[in-house]
Image (cartoon, rainbow, N blue to C red):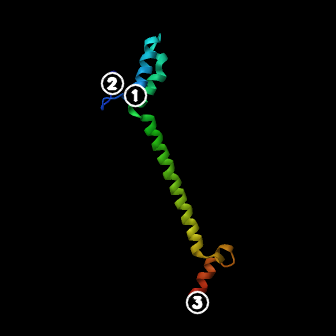
Amino acid sequence: MASGYGYSGGRARCFAFWQEFSKCYASADTPSQCTSQVEDYIECLHHRKEIARAFEIKEQHMKNVAHQNKESRKVAQVLSEGVITNVGLISKREDEGSTKE
């Protein structure tokens, strides 16, 4: 990777981050001063933070869809029961009892 050439012969995708890190490391008194450059370079290579964020976004989206489906089922159930029973004019038990007689 330190050569700067990628698989197709051009610049590697993380070469700029590598140069930034190597420049910091050469001028730093202690290696701990270059932690942000190291993190950027490692993230460019492995995309761990990006993958974790995408997973969280997908998980939240799935929760939102499940909640919307649950609310839609509730609305559909209320509509299927009819408007009069929901107003409270006729209770379900009275309605069921009158049809059995």
Other-residue count near label 2 (Cα within 10 Å), few / some / many at <14 / 14–19 / ≥20: few
Q: Residue at label 2?
A: 1
Other-residue count near label 3 (Cα within 10 Å), few / some / many at <14 / 14–19 / ≥20: few
Which mark's residue is nearer the viewer, 3 or 2?
Answer: 2
- Viewer-side residue, 67 vs 98: 67
Task: Tell me the SS state at disc 1.
Answer: loop
Location of residue 8 in the rendering, given as x and y in whole percent from the top left corner: 30, 32
Q: Residue at label 1?
A: 14
Separation (CA) of disc 1 from disc 3: 80 Å
Location of residue 73 in the rendering, given as x and y in whole percent from the top left corner: 54, 65
Do tag 3 and tag 2 residues touch (Cβ < 8 Å)?
no
- Identify the disc placed on residue 101: 3
The residue under the point 69% across, 78% down is 89
95 with respect to 25 (left or right)? right
Amino acid on which the number 2 mark rests in the picture: Met
Choose top left, top right, bottom left or bottom right for residue 99.
bottom right
95 with respect to 44 (left or right)? right
The residue under the point 30% across, 29% down is 9
79 with respect to 32 (left or right)? right
Amino acid on which the number 1 mark rests in the picture: Cys
- Identify the disc placed on residue 33: none
Query: Sequence-wise, which precedes: disc 3 or disc 2?
Result: 2
Other-residue count near label 1 (Cα within 10 Å), few / some / many at <14 / 14–19 / ≥20: some
Location of residue 26 in the rendering, given as x and y in whole percent from the top left corner: 43, 12
The residue under the point 58% across, 75% down is 81
Do tag 2 and tag 1 residues touch (Cβ < 8 Å)?
yes
Separation (CA) of disc 2 from disc 1: 9 Å
Quarter of the figure with the N terminus: top left
In the image, residue 94 above or below residue 61: below
Query: Sequence-wise, which precedes: disc 2 or disc 1?
Result: 2
- Viewer-side residue, 6 vs 88: 6
Quarter of the figure with the C terminus: bottom right
